[in-house]
Image (cartoon, rainbow, N blue to C red):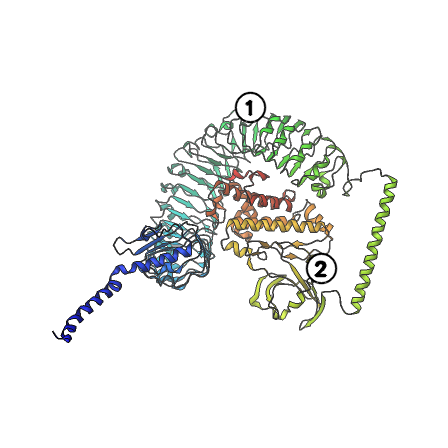
């Protein structure tokens, strides 16, 4: 055959061979395997996934799911809760067939590209919740996405206007971020949306009326934002809705009657708003309603008997409103009712006689009303009641037997009523689970020296009754932390067996008829913080073993018959903050250290004491050796002469410098359009980077107030950055330059360093220059969702700064810190950085100390501690110091916090941004104990407020472990846990 013919026959076969090869690598679907393996290896290296074993097929790697076909396409990646950190690997969005990505509950951070969703059109579910992502929301639309969860991160900015382009979305959760602005109208275009969560952001404006178009909605959670205006009546068009939560906003007006159209609604939460008017009758037609919470509003009127229609109701919270009239008898006939909280209203009349007989009550709180009559016998018929709160009413009669025999009870608060009878003749002292029992402020009589069998008891308050006889040897519990028997007619000695109460933190036995000495066995109570034996007939000496008590901070022995001298080492107790020994038979010298340095006249009067450190007592007489006295006088005189000579030399040198036109080494005069300025540097290098007012621009402003504005300024020559505070009040600059020089020498890691000052010779204003701190303002961080461990570190830093400034004042420099959350900076290491404020120049340091730390008679005393307490409340609750008009019956943020601490579960007042961190009993105790400290700091009685040293001790101990043993001034920490 001819060669050309042979080649012609072979050519088609060659073509077929190459076509086969091409089809194998580019057409066969299995060719994706090496590409997807490469992507997975990139993710493995980026996230350090050591459990992805390359010896196995990647479809068997943990968290990797593939399709069921032989193509082995990656369709899902689940890496939730793997402690991953770093940036999100963008290659995870490059899988051509990926449908689900779950990276939730890790420590991933950084920004997410805005086009990441539109670049992966196969994606149906994306969960990046509970990480530390920042920046703008990734919102370039993916029309096929069905589930998007970006909650509990640190995203900021507005919700994008094009969010309505996610047309197939069924689940959207953007809660727990720092989003601002309003809800875009385009959101109503997502007709398929079933779950909408935007809670715990900083969103505002009105809830758009177009929300009524979204007929598929079943769940709405918009709580903990700043939404205002009325609840749109169009919300009644969402007939598929079974969960509606609009809590903690600024919503006003009445509850719309259209809400009665939501016939599938099971959960309705509208608490912590400003709603007014009556509850619409249509609401009581929601027969599927299981939980109703309208608390903390301004609602009024009576609760109608038609509430009987809510036969599925399990939880009813109407507390802290203005409801009046009688408690409806219809509540008796709600068989599933478990939690009934109606406290802090104007309810009157008697409690329905059969309440609890047909219910399944577990929690009943009717406190702070005007209820009368007796406590119903049937409250515990369910045998599940564990929390009974009826205080501050007008109940009378004895505690019913049904309550005294209720074995399920754990927390009982009946104080401040008109109850009577003998408690030892009932079984209330034999309830096995009760840990909190408060019967104070009633008319109970009889003795206490009987059989107590309460093994879980931690807090017992029987104060202000008419109990008599001797103290019992035991209360049947080794867990007792807080015991208050004050204001009764008890007599006899303190039993030595009280020393067995090793968990005791507060012992208050004041205003009784007790006698004898303080038993030495109390020295075993090493957790004791507060000992109050005031107004008794106690005798003997003040025990020496007080000095061995590690955390004892308050001792009140006044109005007794103690004698002898004060133990000289008592003042050396580091923990001791306050002591009152007035009106006894004590004599000798008052110790001159520790808590005795700040003692006032009312705490020492009525004795035969002398003292050398205070003008409150006559000086102590002492005999001196004449020879040694003469020798010492000569030495002191020589030292004085040397100091005078040194001062004269310094003055002469300053005069010489002045004649040469130099005020001091770092003090100059400058002139600009505002006139002549006196400029003083505290650092020789500062003058090289000095800035003028002309370098300040409005866009650099950090914070403003009526008296000062803060700017971040960059020097045009050295590019150094400063924090400048312009002071508008000239009187604040009347201090001498030497004072500012001394102030600049204050050095502490939690205090922003002062670099220089400048004062206009015209006397109109001046400015202070501080080092620049890279970070954010405290309030901005708290509102943005700062974690609890970081909030704790900030509180520790502030307390350390206060202690340092307290010490500087004692050394003669009256300097205080600005404790405004709008001015406290938090650096990148979560260290609080305080700015110093100008002193009260009309008083010296001694007068300043007396007015701030010593004077216990005025509200202004210890004001820095009070402000620190406000900061703690904000760190715990996330609520700012809002206007009194927004607090309803509470009047102030402090009173609101005090009530929540005493009578609400932690979940009702803790900042929802840190709620997920409170997952253990130990962490719950930490949070509750911190609130205890905050309330001590803001106590109306300045003598109760702790000093800076005590604050530091608490938070330093707390930063390593729980400090439940260290507190106990007013309440036991665990007592508030329901």
Indicate left or right for 66 with 780 as reference.
left
Which mark's residue is nearer the viewer, 1 or 2? Answer: 2
The 10 Å Cα crowd at callout 2, few under 14, some 14 to 19, many 20 or more, is some
Q: In this view, does 271 lie above or below 400?
A: below
Q: Which residue is drawn at 55% across and 28% down?
A: 475
Tag 1 and tag 2, C-beta contact below 8 Å = no
Q: In this view, does 6 lie above or below 342?
A: below
Give residue 450's mark: 1
Q: Which residue is drawn at 24% across and 61% down?
A: 28
Give residue 741's mark: 2
In the foreground, 844 or 328: 844
Residue 892 % position (x, y): 56, 49
Lower position in the chain sequence, tag 1 or tag 2: 1
Q: Residue 384: in sight, yes or no?
A: yes
Q: In this view, does 299 lie above or below 146?
A: above
In the foreground, 385 or 47: 47
Q: Residue at x 83, y 52 (%)?
A: 640
């Amino acid at each position: 055959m001819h060669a050309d013919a042979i080649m012609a026959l072979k050519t088609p076969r060659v073509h077929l061979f190459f076509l086969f090869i091409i089809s194998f690598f580019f057409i066969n679907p299995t060719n994706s395997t090496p590409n997807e393996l490469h992507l997975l290896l990139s993710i493995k290296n980026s996230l350090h996934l050591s459990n992805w074993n390359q010896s196995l097929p990647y479809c068997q790697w943990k968290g990797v799911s593939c399709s069921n076909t032989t193509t082995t396409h990656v369709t899902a990646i689940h890496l939730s809760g793997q402690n991953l950190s770093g940036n999100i690997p963008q290659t995870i969005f490059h899988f051509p067939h990926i449908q689900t990505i779950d990276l939730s509950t890790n420590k991933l951070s950084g920004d997410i590209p805005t086009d990441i969703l539109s670049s992966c059109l196969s994606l149906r579910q994306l969960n990046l919740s509970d990480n530390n992502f920042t920046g703008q929301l990734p919102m370039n639309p993916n029309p096929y996405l069905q589930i998007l969860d970006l909650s509990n991160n640190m995203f900021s900015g507005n919700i994008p206007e094009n969010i309505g382009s996610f047309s197939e979305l069924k689940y959207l959760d953007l809660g727990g971020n720092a989003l601002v602005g309003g809800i875009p109208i385009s959101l109503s275009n997502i007709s398929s949306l079933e779950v909408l969560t935007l809670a715990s952001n900083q969103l505002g404006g009105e809830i758009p009326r177009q929300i009524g178009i979204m007929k598929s909605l079943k769940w709405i959670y918009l709580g903990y934002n700043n939404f205002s205006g009325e609840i749109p009546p169009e919300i009644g068009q969402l007939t598929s809705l079974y969960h509606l939560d609009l809590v903690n906003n600024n919503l006003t007006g009445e509850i719309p009657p259209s809400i009665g159209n939501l016939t599938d609604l099971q959960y309705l939460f509208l608490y912590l708003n400003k709603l007014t008017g009556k509850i619409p009758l249509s609401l009581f037609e929601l027969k599927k309603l299981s939980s109703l919470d309208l608390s903390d509003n301004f609602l009024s009127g009576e609760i109608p008997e038609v509430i009987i229609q809510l036969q599925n109701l399990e939880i009813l919270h109407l507390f802290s409103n203005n409801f009046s009239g009688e408690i409806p008898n219809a509540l008796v006939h709600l068989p599933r009712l478990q939690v009934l909280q109606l406290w802090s209203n104007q309810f009157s009349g008697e409690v329905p006689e059969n309440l609890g007989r047909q219910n399944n009550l577990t929690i009943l709180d009717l406190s702070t009303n005007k209820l009368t009559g007796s406590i119903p016998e049937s409250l515990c018929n369910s045998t599940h009641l564990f929390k009974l709160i009826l205080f501050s009413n007008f109940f009378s009669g004895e505690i019913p037997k049904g309550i005294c025999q209720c074995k399920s009870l754990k927390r009982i608060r009946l104080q401040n009523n008109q109850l009577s009878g003998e408690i030892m003749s009932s079984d209330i002292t034999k309830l096995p689970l009760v840990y909190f029992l408060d019967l104070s402020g009633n008319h109970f009589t009889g003795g206490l020296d009987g059989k107590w069998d309460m093994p879980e008891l931690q807090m017992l308050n029987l104060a202000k009754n008419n109990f008599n006889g001797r103290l019992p040897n035991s209360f049947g519990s080794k867990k007792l932390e807080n015991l208050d028997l004050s204001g009764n007619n008890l007599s006899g000695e303190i039993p030595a067996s009280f020393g067995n109460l090793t968990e005791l933190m507060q012992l208050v036995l004041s205003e009784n008829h007790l006698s004898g000495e303080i038993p030495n066995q109390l020295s075993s109570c090493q957790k004791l913080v507060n000992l109050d034996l005031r107004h008794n007939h106690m005798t003997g000496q003040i025990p020496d073993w007080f000095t061995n008590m590690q955390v004892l901070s308050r001792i009140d022995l006044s109005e007794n018959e103690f004698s002898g001298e004060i133990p000289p080492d008592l003042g050396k107790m580091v923990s001791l903050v306050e002591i009152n020994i007035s009106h006894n038979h004590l004599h000798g010298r008052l110790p001159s250290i520790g808590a005795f340095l700040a003692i006032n006249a009312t705490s020492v009067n009525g004795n035969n004491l002398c003292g050398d450190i205070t003008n409150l007592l006559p000086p102590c007489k002492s005999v001196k050796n004449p020879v040694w006295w003469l020798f010492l006088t000569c030495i002191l005189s020589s030292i004085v002469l040397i100091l005078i000579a040194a001062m004269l030399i310094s003055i002469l040198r300053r005069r010489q410098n002045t004649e040469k036109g130099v005020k001091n080494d770092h003090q100059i005069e400058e002139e600009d359009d505002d006139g002549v300025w006196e400029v003083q540097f505290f650092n020789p290098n500062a003058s090289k980077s000095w800035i003028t007012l002309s370098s300040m621009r409005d866009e650099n402003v950090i914070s403003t107030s009526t008296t000062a504005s803060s700017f971040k300024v960059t020097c045009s020559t050295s590019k150094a950055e400063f924090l400048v505070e312009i002071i508008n009040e000239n009187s604040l600059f009347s201090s001498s330059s030497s004072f500012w020089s001394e102030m600049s020498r204050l050095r502490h890691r939690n205090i922003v360093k002062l670099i220089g000052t400048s004062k206009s010779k015209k006397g109109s204003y001046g400015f202070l220059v501080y080092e620049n701190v890279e970070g954010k303002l405290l309030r901005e961080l708290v509102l943005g969702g700062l974690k609890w461990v970081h909030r704790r570190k900030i509180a520790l830093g502030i307390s350390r700064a206060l202690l340092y400034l307290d010490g500087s004042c004692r050394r003669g420099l009256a300097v205080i810190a600005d404790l405004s959350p709008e001015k406290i900076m938090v650096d990148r290491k979560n260290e609080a950085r305080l700015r110093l404020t100008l002193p009260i120049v009309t008083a010296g340091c001694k007068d300043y100390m007396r007015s701030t730390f010593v004077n216990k008679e005025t509200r202004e005393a210890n004001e820095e501690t009070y402000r620190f307490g406000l900061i703690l409340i904000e760190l715990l609750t996330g609520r700012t110091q809002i206007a009194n008009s927004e607090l309803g019956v509470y009047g102030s943020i402090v009173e609101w916090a005090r009530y929540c601490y005493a009578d609400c579960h932690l979940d009702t007042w803790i900042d929802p941004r840190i709620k997920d961190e409170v997952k253990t009993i130990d962490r719950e105790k930490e949070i509750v104990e911190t609130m205890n400290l905050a309330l001590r700091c803001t106590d109306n009685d300045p003598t109760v407020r702790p000093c800076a040293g005590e604050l530091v001790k608490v938070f330093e101990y707390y930063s390593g472990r729980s400090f439940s043993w260290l507190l106990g001034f007013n309440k036991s920490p665990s007592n508030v846990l329901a």
